């Protein structure tokens, strides 16, 4: 590929990113007009304010007690936002809104990597029509940050499977993902195995990244255990709420269907059908999406305590699957 061709492709990517950025008013317009909603927005905003007041970045506090229901990354970002914009509703919601916009850019690059640029672009624009994605992107919560980091980690894993120079970026993204919410980030692991299966990398290439990941995440775990003796029990309990073997699977499947359908709107049936149709192509790019989708919803089969916003990370996957199948046909 000539230098001129590379420049032309880079210019096209910039043009597409610019087109995506034109959607930013959907995320930021009058973002701070309404007061923080009870319960999570006010709760998370107060925790982030305490980081600024105390200077403690690892010991999160709420109402005079230790808070470790979720890891600290989302609260760090809210605290930084408060330092930049003041202690107000806009600052609390800004990280989620930015993560929403970055999710569109990331799904473009992920779709481009798995299929082609048109699939990436139409997937990004279609994600804007997911009601709950856009709604939570304008809320001071962690769901859209989680969704963005899922997409980014998948994209960087694919790039790392092609060239080991991307391994450090992939590991950093996976660390940030792990530090965003409790337990659920680990549902990406089966998809990562699919990505790296028969890749150009050798086992020795993974040793340093794994050690680095364990050091960072392990250090955070040890710090939290020093603050709270039952931290691990709490971590699992929050991450797998109400999970039990005797759950009614049919009721849980119905609940999952209702939540995803209501959350993503008219793209539910095209997306779900495409996830399973993708198996017929026997292509790795479809198996990445299929395995992630299945592994992500698996814990919800054993619990009725999931919520509609917990399933937002499936929305871009279903949209990518649909346009990927359409493109392949």
Image: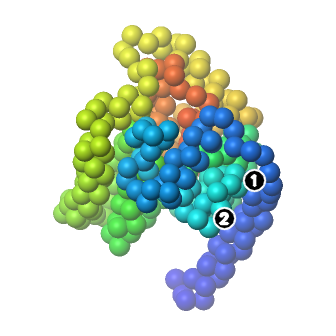
Quadrant of the image occupied by residue 65: top left
Q: What percent of the width, then of the height, locates residue 246?
A: 39, 10
Residue 60, given in percent of the width and then of the height, sits at 42, 47
Query: What is the x, y in percent for residue 33?
Result: 80, 51
Whether residue 68 sits left or right of residue 35 in the image: it is left
Compared to residue 131, the image places residue 6 above or below, namely below
Query: So how many labels did they put on this image?
Result: 2
Q: How busy is the neighbourhood of tag 2: few (under 14 within 10 Å), some, or many (20 plus)?
A: some
Instruction: Please name whichever residue, 273 or 98, is drawn nearer the observer in this view of the structure.
Output: 98
Say which element carries label 1.
loop
* Local SS, label 2: helix
Instruction: Classify mark 1: residues with Cα within 10 Å, few (<14), some (14-19) or many (20+).
Output: some
Q: Residue at x 31, y 64 (%)?
A: 200
Residue that label 1 marks: 32
Which residue is tagged 2? Answer: 85
Residue 65 in sight here:
yes
Provide residue 284's location: percent of width, then percent of height: 44, 49
Q: Nearer the viewer, residue 132 or 314?
A: 132
Residue nearest the observer in this picture, 163 or 254: 254
| Left or right, residue 219 beside residue 78 | left
Q: Is residue 126 above or below residue 69?
A: below
Q: Nearer the viewer, residue 288 or 244?
A: 244
Which label was assigned to residue 300?
Answer: none
């Amino acid at each position: 590929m000539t230098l001129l061709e590379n420049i032309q492709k880079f210019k096209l990517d910039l043009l597409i990113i610019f087109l995506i950025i034109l959607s930013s008013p959907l995320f930021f317009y009058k973002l701070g007009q309404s007061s923080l909603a009870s319960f999570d927005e006010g709760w998370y905003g107060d925790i982030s304010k305490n980081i600024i007041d105390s200077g403690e970045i690892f010991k999160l506090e709420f109402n005079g007690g230790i808070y470790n229901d979720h890891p600290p990354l989302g609260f760090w970002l809210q605290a930084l936002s408060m330092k930049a914009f003041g202690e107000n509703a806009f600052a609390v919601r800004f990280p989620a809104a930015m993560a929403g916009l970055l999710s569109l850019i990331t799904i473009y690059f992920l779709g481009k990597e798995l299929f082609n640029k048109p699939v990436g672009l139409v997937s990004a624009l279609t994600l804007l029509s997911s009601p709950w994605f856009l709604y939570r992107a304008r809320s001071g919560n962690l769901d859209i940050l989680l969704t963005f980091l899922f997409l980014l980690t998948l994209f960087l894993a694919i790039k790392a499977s092609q060239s080991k120079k991307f391994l450090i970026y992939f590991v950093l993204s996976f660390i940030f993902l792990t530090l965003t919410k409790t337990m659920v980030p680990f549902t990406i692991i089966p998809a990562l195995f699919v990505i790296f299966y028969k890749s150009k990398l050798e086992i020795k290439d993974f040793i340093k990244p794994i050690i680095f990941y364990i050091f960072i995440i392990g250090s955070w775990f040890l710090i939290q255990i020093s603050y709270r003796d039952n931290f691990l029990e709490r971590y699992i309990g929050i991450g797998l709420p109400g999970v039990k073997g005797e759950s009614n699977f049919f009721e849980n499947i119905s609940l999952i269907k209702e939540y995803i359908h209501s959350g993503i709107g008219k793209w539910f049936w095209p997306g779900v059908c495409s996830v399973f149709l993708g198996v017929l192509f026997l292509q790795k790019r479809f198996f990445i999406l299929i395995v992630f989708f299945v592994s992500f919803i698996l814990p919800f089969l054993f619990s009725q305590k999931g919520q509609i916003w917990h399933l937002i990370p499936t929305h871009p996957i279903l949209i990518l699957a649909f346009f990927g199948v359409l493109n392949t046909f």
